[in-house]
Amino acid sequence: MDELQPTDPRQVGRYRITGRLGGGGMGQVYLGHSPSGRLVAVKVVRPELAQDPGFRRRFAREVEAARRVTGFFTAAVVDADPEGATPWLATAYVPGLPLNEAVAAHGPWPVESVRTLGAGLAEALEAIHAAGLVHRDFKPSNILLASDGPRVVDFGISVAAEATALTHTGMIVGTPGFMAPEQLVGRPVTPASDVFALGAVLAYVATGTSPFGTGSAQALNFRIAYEEPDLSRLPGPGLEIIERCLAKDPGQRPSVTTLIGELAPVRRESRSAEPTAPRTATWLPTPVTGALSTTLPLMSAREIPPPAIERPQPAPVPTPSARPTAPARPAAPPPPTASGGRTTYPFWTAILALAIAMVLPPVEGSTVALTSMSEGSWPFVIAAAFGVGTCTTALFLAHSSHTAPVPRWPRYLHALATVLNGSLLLLYHSVGEKDFALYRGGGYALALASVTLLLGLIRFPTSRRGATW
């Protein structure tokens, strides 16, 4: 998840926006919080699409159809506003690892994992198609991996956007390398088009690269439309169905029902009457399972919604037969945060040290910096005041970063203040003929200020670290 940009909304509908989850040709996806604290993925449509009345009508129809998609391997649509100034769509947030990131980081998958993934994705497409939708942008980044199976996201507005694209020069809905031939040449797009994209996704997962190679979008689209896919690197038997999915003729591709039947894990017959253990994260390759267990807690902890207000419960009425219970122990005080703990010490120390450095002579034989600005000490005073200002900003952000995202620019200004004051320290060191013993109190204060400014740079609050840094 990325930080919000200055132009990003902080509120969409009734959802509080706290981060960027991704984006594409149709809009930007944000992490949102409902009033009760539930996480949702909010997709805001691009302004040029929002200005098209035809798109709005198609978007409203597609959202209504998307609400009917209830498959286990899809992210349900929970809210939308097709009539707003900027149309948006909210789906259930899935704290999963994007498939493209998993393959890029950990390489191709074994055959059994690819088959299990394919069965889950075919089941998701079956639910989407049953609602009268075609995904049209089925690609690895729109597939999230969870321990109990994959989740398909970002469906419901592709068909509306694709119809609108006909009136926008140079605009195409879909991702190069994962679009069906008929989608590229302007022929009708059907559920078989999603089956083609599914075949390309499974080939990518099994080999680590697209079956149509790499290169520009034009080159990839040409190979999809007129050349055969390169499936020579598919590992072993068991994935022959991928070639059928990538047939140029939509009529020769298998249906999603056929895919589910052929890719579903086969339960081996056993003489034992013991039931088969349910599948959890064991369907994933071992490196991906490890990445999932370490990544997801971090993702969920990046932005914690405000806790619900707990109302006091009435004390139970004692009965004659009931024994009196011991009074409950008071809750332990919360751990100190950046607003009142040791993490703010570098900023307070730097402010004090810079103040002392400005009212004491920096080196032997010099005068107080504040009283000799006309004699050339003004760079020192400006740098010291700049450092005090950035430390004060850091203290303010440490108190407020738990309620609002922290931008990057205050941290950059603090880094600049650290460099300026450190440079002044080296300058006064050279003036003192490289003998630190010639320093007076102001020089020592400047040295302390430079060190604490550097420590403060490490502890500077950001929206990624939160208020405890």
Image (spheres, grey):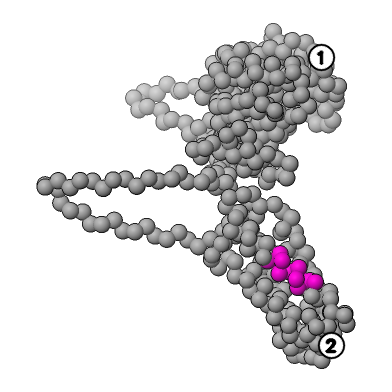
User: Who is closer to the viewer here, 248 or 127?
Assistant: 127
Residue at 63% x, 25% y is: 81
Judging by the rendered image, the residue that carries numbered circle 1 is 185
Q: Could you say whether the residue bearing mark 1 is in a helix, strand or loop?
A: helix
Judging by the rendered image, the residue that carries numbered circle 2 is 433
User: Who is closer to the viewer here, 15 or 364?
Assistant: 15
As drawn, 133 above or below 84: above
Which residues are drawn in magenta?
382-391
Residue at 60% x, 26% y is: 80
Q: Position of residue 366 (x, y in %)?
A: 82, 88
User: Who is closer to the viewer here, 233 or 336?
Assistant: 336
Q: Residues within 10 Å of mark 2 (few under 14, many from 20)?
A: few
Residue at 34% x, 25% y is: 273
Which sits earlier in the primary sequence, circle 2 or circle 1?
1
Residue at 70% x, 40% y is: 8
Is 55 displayed left or right of 398 in the figure? right
Q: Residue furthest right?
A: 375
Q: Which mark is residue 335?
A: none
Is 254 displayed left or right of 228 in the figure? left
Q: Could you say whether the residue bearing mark 2 is in a helix, strand or loop?
A: loop
Q: Position of residue 461 (x, y in %)?
A: 64, 58
As drawn, 119 above or below 145: above
Name the kind of residue labelled 2 in the image.
Glu
